[in-house]
Image: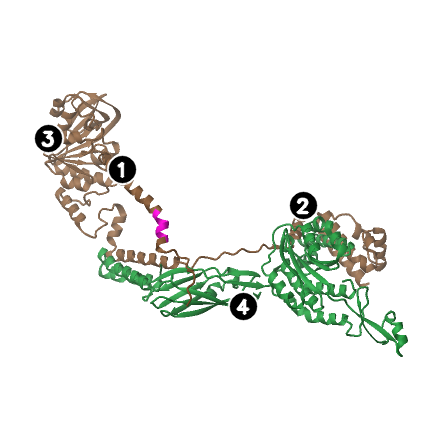
C-alpha cells in the first residue's frame, strides 16, 4: 500500500500545544500576578471595626488593650457563632446592628433578654431598635464631638469626656442611664435587660477606631464598656451571614438554642439548615433521595446535551447562483400603476395592444396601426351595424374616469377583438 | 471526542441508585466516577481516526437529473477494529433537499488492517462542479459510550453537465435537414446552395432549375438538384450577464439558452457545419472553437457546466469584438441574450452593425410566460393594471425586436421550453434560404 500525504484535518497534540501555549502562558501570568498582589495586600483585608484590622477605621488597638486587661476576645462573623458563645459572663459587641435581618433581630433580642450578659450595640438605627430594643426611640443624629458624661453612671464618670454623637436615644424605661447628652438627648444609653443582663447603646462607633482610641476618654470608656466580663464576643454582622443561630420555638432556653444550632451545623447532609425563609422549609420537606436523584438527572441531561450537540462535521457552504424572477419588473410596474391609479397610462397601453392585435386581422399596414383615420373605418366595416359601441371611442377615446370604467374598457376591447375575429 | 446516547442513558439510570440507595455525595461519586472511567477507557480503546487512509474512485461527471456514484475506500491501518459512523460531506445541492443526511452518512466496520468501501450516491440539483468537502469519521469504542471524531480531506470533483432536455427535438430537425439535403425530391434553391447532381424532371419541379444544356445532350429533360452548403461556421454566443440571470418559471434564462445552444450544436454538426461556443459578460467566460462533428458536443457540455450568470451588465462592445476575432467571415452568429429595452438599446444596437456587416445574426431570447399570463388578466382592477403592465412589456419587446430586424437580424423571442426548437428552426430556414 502506498503511503499518501496525511489527509487528516484534526490538529495533532503538538499543534494543539503550539496553539494553546500562548493563551496558557497569559492565564498563568494573570494567576501568578493575582496571587502575588493578594499576598502583598493581605493585611488590609479586614473590614471596619474588625478586631484584627490595623486600618484607621479598624479596632485592633481596642482589642489588644482588652487582651492586655485579661479579656479574651472572640471575633464572630455569624450570629450562630455569636449566640452560641454568649452567656451570663460575656460581653456581646454587635458592630453593625443595621445589617441584621428580622429573623436575626428576633433571635438576638431573645438572647439579649435571656442570656444575662452585657450587649453593646454600636449605632443601631430606628429599624434595628424596633427589633432589638423596642422600648428605645431615636432622635435626629448629630455630629460626633467630644461630649461630657453628664450622668451618674460610674463608667462614664471615670472615663470623662469622650467622642460620641451620631444617633441619639430616648427611652421611658426604668433604671436606664442616659449619658453623654447632646442637645438634650443621650448618645449613650444603658438599660437593664432580662435575666440580670444589660444593654448598652452607643450613638456612634468612633471611639473604637484605631485612630480615635487615644483621644479624650475614648479608650477608658471602651475598655470599661467591653471589659466588664472576662469574655468578649466581637460579632461583625454581614449580608452574607444568614444564620439565626436558632429556630424560633417558644419555651426553648438560651442554652438549648445554642446547642440546637451546633447540632444542626454539624449534621452532615442537612444543607438546608442555614437557608432562610420558605425555600429552606420546602427543601426540608423533600426527601434527600429526590434531591440527589434530581442532581443525578441533571448530570444525565448534561451528558445528553453533549451527545446531541456534537455534529458529525460542520455544515458545508455553497455559493448559490443569483436568480431573479424575470417578470419582476413587469409586476413592479403593475403595482406602481395601481398605487398612483395610472388609468390614463394603463388604458393607453391596453388600447395600443388591442390595436396591434387588430391591425393584422384587418389587413391594415403596420405603419397605420395607430392611425385613427385608417384603423377605425376598417374596424367599423367588420362590425354589425346594430351594435351601439363606437370603435373610435373604444380604441382612441379618453382615459376612463374610474377603476370600474377601466375594467369595463378592458372587457370591451376583448369583446371588440372577438367580434372582429369571428366576423 | 464525542459521547453517545448510551452514556446519557446510563447516567439517567444512575438516578435510581442515587435516589434510593445512597442519596448524597457518596452515591453521586459511586455512580459517576465509574461512568467517567468507562468513558475514558472507551475513548482510549476506540480505533484512531487520524491514521485512517482514504482513496476515492467513481464518476467524475453526471448529467443534471441523473445520479453519480462516488466510492470512498477506508483503510484501517491500526491494530484495533473500527466501528464508525462516516459522513462524506458534499455541497447541499448535491442531493435533493431533505435527503442529504441519509445519502451522506454511512455506518461501517473495518477490522484491523483491512479496508472497506462505501459508496455515496449524488443526485445534483444544479449544474456546475461539486467538490467533496470533508470526510468526518466518528469511531466508537467497544462499549459504545464514547467516540473519537476526526475529519479528513479527500478531494474529488463531480462535474454536473447541462441536461440537454431538447435532445427529443433532434430527430424531427434532422429529418428536415435531410429534406434540405437534395436526397429527397424537394428542392430548395438559393444563392448559397451548391450544385449537387442532375436527375430527370418530374412534374412539379421548379422549371427554373431545368438544366437546358444537359437536356440537349440527353433524351429527357434534366433538372439540377442543389444541396445546402456545408462546412459553414456557426457560433453560439451566451450572454452570461444580468439579463440571463432572470428566472423564467423555475429555470434561469441562461439554462434555456444553453439547452438551445446544445441542440443547435447537435444539429449543426450533423449538417456538416462547424459549431463553436462563446460565453461572455464583462469578460470571456468560456470558449469552444468550432470543430468537427465528433467532439463538439462533449466539449461544449464540458464548457457550459460551470457557467453561472453574473449580476453584471454585459460589455457588448467587448463581446462583439471577441466574436469578430473568433468567427471567420460569413459565420452564423446566434446571440442568446435578453430583449429588455435598456440593455439592447444601449449595449447591443450601437455595435450590431459591426456584427451584421460580415455575419448572419440571430438573436434569441427566452420570453417569460408570466408576462403573457399577466396580459390576459381581466376582471379586477389589480389584474387589469397587470394586463396593462404586461402589454407594455410585450410592446417594448416587440419594438426592440423590430428594431433588431431592421438590421437584418433574425429574432427568436419565445417561451423557454420552445427556445431550443425555435432556434433550430431558424437555423434550418436560414440554411434552406441559403443565407449561410
Q: Which residue is mark 2?
A: A340
Check disc 2 and report its element: helix, strand or loop. Answer: helix
C-alpha span from label 4 to label 1: 68 Å
The colour applied to the residues of chain B in this rendering is green
**Could you tell me if residue B359 is visible in this image?**
yes
* Spatial CA span between label 2 and label 3: 99 Å
Query: How far separated are the C-alphas under marks 1 and 3?
Result: 33 Å
Mark closest to the chain's N terminus, 2 or 1:
1
Tell me if mark 3 has few (under 14), some (14-19) or many (20+) residues whose alpha carbon lies within 10 angstroms of its own.
few
Residue B76 % position (x, y): 38, 67
The quarter of the rendered structure image containing the N terminus of chain B is bottom left
Q: Is residue A328 left or right of residue B93?
A: right
Mark 1: which secondary structure? helix
Is residue A114 one of those drawn in magenta? no
Q: Which residues are magenta?
A: A15-21
Q: x%, y% of residue B302?
A: 60, 63
In the picture, the disc for residue A37 is: 1
> Where does the C terminus of chain B fall, quadrant-wise?
bottom right
- Mark 1 neighbour density, 10 Å: few (under 14) some (14–19) many (20 or more): few
**Residue tagged 3:** A68
Q: Is disc 3 placed on a helix, strand or loop? A: helix
Task: Tell which of A49 and A140 is nearer to you.
Answer: A49
- Foreground mark, 2 or 3, reads 3
Q: Chain of mark 2?
A: A
- Marks 2/1: CA distance? 74 Å
Q: Position of residue B193 (x, y in %)?
A: 79, 66
Q: Report the Cα–Cα distance between label 3 and label 4.
A: 97 Å
Amino acid at each position: 500500500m502506498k503511503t499518501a500525504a496525511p489527509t487528516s484535518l484534526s490538529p495533532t497534540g503538538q499543534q494543539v500545544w503550539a496553539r494553546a501555549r500562548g493563551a496558557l502562558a497569559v492565564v498563568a501570568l494573570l494567576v501568578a500576578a493575582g496571587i502575588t498582589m493578594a499576598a502583598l495586600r493581605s493585611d488590609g483585608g479586614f473590614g471596619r471595626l474588625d478586631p484584627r484590622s490595623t486600618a484607621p477605621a479598624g479596632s485592633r488597638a481596642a482589642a489588644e488593650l482588652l487582651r492586655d486587661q485579661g479579656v479574651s476576645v472572640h471575633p464572630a462573623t455569624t450570629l450562630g457563632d455569636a449566640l452560641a458563645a454568649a452567656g451570663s459572663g460575656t460581653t456581646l459587641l454587635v458592630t453593625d446592628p443595621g445589617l441584621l435581618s428580622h429573623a436575626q433581630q428576633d433571635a438576638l433580642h431573645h438572647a439579649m433578654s435571656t442570656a444575662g450578659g452585657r450587649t453593646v450595640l454600636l449605632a443601631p438605627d430606628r429599624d434595628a431598635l424596633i427589633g432589638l430594643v423596642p422600648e428605645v426611640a431615636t432622635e435626629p443624629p448629630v455630629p460626633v464631638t467630644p461630649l461630657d458624661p453628664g450622668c451618674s453612671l460610674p463608667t462614664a464618670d471615670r472615663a470623662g469626656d469622650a467622642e460620641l454623637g451620631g444617633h441619639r436615644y430616648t427611652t421611658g424605661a426604668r433604671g436606664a442611664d442616659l449619658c453623654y447628652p447632646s442637645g438634650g438627648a443621650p448618645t449613650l444609653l444603658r438599660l437593664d435587660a432580662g435575666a440580670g443582663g444589660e444593654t448598652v447603646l452607643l450613638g456612634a462607633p468612633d471611639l473604637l477606631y484605631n485612630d480615635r482610641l487615644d483621644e479624650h476618654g475614648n479608650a477608658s470608656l471602651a475598655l470599661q464598656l467591653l471589659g466588664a466580663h472576662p469574655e468578649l464576643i466581637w460579632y461583625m454582622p454581614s449580608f452574607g451571614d444568614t444564620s439565626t443561630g436558632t429556630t424560633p420555638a417558644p419555651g426553648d432556653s438560651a442554652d438549648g438554642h445554642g446547642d440546637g444550632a451546633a447540632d444542626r451545623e454539624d449534621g452532615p447532609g442537612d444543607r438546608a439548615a442555614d437557608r432562610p425563609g420558605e425555600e429552606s422549609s420546602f427543601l426540608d420537606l423533600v426527601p434527600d433521595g429526590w434531591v440527589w436523584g434530581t442532581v443525578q438527572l441533571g448530570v444525565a441531561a448534561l451528558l445528553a446535551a453533549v451527545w446531541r450537540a456534537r455534529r458529525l462535521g460542520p455544515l458545508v457552504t455553497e455559493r448559490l447562483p443569483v436568480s431573479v424572477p424575470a417578470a419582476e419588473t413587469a409586476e413592479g410596474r403593475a403595482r406602481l400603476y395601481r398605487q398612483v391609479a395610472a388609468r390614463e397610462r394603463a388604458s393607453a397601453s391596453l388600447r395600443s395592444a388591442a390595436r396591434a392585435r387588430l391591425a393584422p386581422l384587418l389587413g391594415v399596414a403596420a405603419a397605420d396601426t395607430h392611425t385613427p383615420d385608417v384603423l377605425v373605418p376598417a374596424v367599423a366595416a367588420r362590425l354589425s351595424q346594430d351594435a351601439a359601441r363606437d370603435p373610435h371611442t373604444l380604441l382612441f377615446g379618453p382615459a376612463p374616469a374610474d377603476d370600474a370604467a377601466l375594467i369595463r374598457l378592458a372587457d370591451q376591447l376583448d369583446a371588440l377583438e372577438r367580434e372582429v375575429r369571428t366576423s | 471526542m464525542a459521547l453517545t446516547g448510551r452514556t446519557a442513558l446510563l447516567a439517567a439510570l444512575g438516578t435510581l441508585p442515587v435516589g434510593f440507595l445512597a442519596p448524597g455525595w457518596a452515591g453521586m461519586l459511586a455512580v459517576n466516577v465509574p461512568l467517567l472511567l468507562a468513558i475514558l477507557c472507551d475513548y482510549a480503546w476506540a480505533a484512531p481516526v487520524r491514521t485512517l487512509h482514504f482513496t476515492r474512485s467513481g464518476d467524475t461527471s453526471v448529467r443534471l437529473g441523473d445520479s453519480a456514484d462516488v466510492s470512498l475506500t477506508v483503510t484501517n491501518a491500526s491494530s484495533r477494529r473500527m466501528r464508525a459512523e462516516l459522513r462524506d460531506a458534499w455541497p447541499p445541492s448535491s442531493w435533493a433537499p431533505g435527503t442529504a443526511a441519509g445519502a451522506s452518512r454511512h455506518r461501517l466496520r473495518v477490522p484491523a488492517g483491512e479496508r472497506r468501501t462505501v459508496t455515496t450516491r449524488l443526485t445534483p440539483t444544479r449544474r456546475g462542479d461539486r467538490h467533496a468537502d470533508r470526510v468526518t469519521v466518528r469511531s466508537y469504542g467497544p462499549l459504545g459510550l464514547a467516540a473519537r471524531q476526526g475529519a479528513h480531506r479527500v478531494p474529488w470533483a463531480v462535474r454536473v453537465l447541462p441536461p440537454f432536455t431538447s435532445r427529443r427535438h433532434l430527430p424531427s430537425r434532422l429529418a428536415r435537414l435531410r429534406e434540405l439535403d437534395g436526397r429527397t425530391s424537394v428542392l430548395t434553391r438559393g444563392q448559397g446552395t451548391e450544385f449537387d447532381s442532375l436527375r430527370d424532371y418530374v412534374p412539379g419541379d421548379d422549371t427554373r432549375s431545368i438544366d437546358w444544356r444537359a437536356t440537349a445532350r440527353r433524351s429527357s429533360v434534366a433538372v439540377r438538384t442543389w444541396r445546402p452548403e456545408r462546412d459553414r461556421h456557426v457560433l453560439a454566443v451566451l450572454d452570461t450577464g444580468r439579463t440571463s440571470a432572470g428566472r423564467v418559471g423555475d429555470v434561469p434564462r441562461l439554462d434555456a439558452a444553453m439547452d438551445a445552444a446544445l441542440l443547435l450544436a447537435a444539429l449543426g454538426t450533423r449538417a456538416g457545419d462547424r459549431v463553436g461556443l462563446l460565453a461572455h459578460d464583462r469578460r470571456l467566460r468560456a470558449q469552444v472553437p468550432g470543430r468537427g462533428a465528433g467532439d463538439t458536443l462533449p466539449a461544449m457540455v464540458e464548457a457550459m457546466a460551470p457557467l453561472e450568470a453574473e449580476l453584471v451588465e454585459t460589455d457588448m462592445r467587448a463581446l462583439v469584438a471577441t466574436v469578430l476575432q473568433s468567427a471567420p467571415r460569413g459565420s452564423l452568429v446566434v446571440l442568446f441574450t435578453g430583449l429588455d429595452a435598456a440593455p439592447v438599446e444601449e449595449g447591443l444596437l450601437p455595435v450590431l452593425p459591426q456584427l451584421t456587416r460580415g455575419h448572419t445574426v440571430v438573436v434569441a431570447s427566452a420570453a417569460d410566460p408570466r408576462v403573457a399570463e399577466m396580459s390576459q388578466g381581466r376582471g379586477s382592477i389589480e389584474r387589469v393594471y397587470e394586463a396593462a403592465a404586461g402589454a407594455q412589456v410585450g410592446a417594448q419587446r416587440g419594438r426592440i425586436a423590430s428594431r433588431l430586424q431592421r438590421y437584418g437580424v433574425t429574432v427568436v423571442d419565445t417561451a423557454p421550453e420552445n427556445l431550443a426548437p425555435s432556434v433550430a428552426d431558424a437555423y434550418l430556414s436560414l440554411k434552406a434560404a441559403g443565407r449561410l
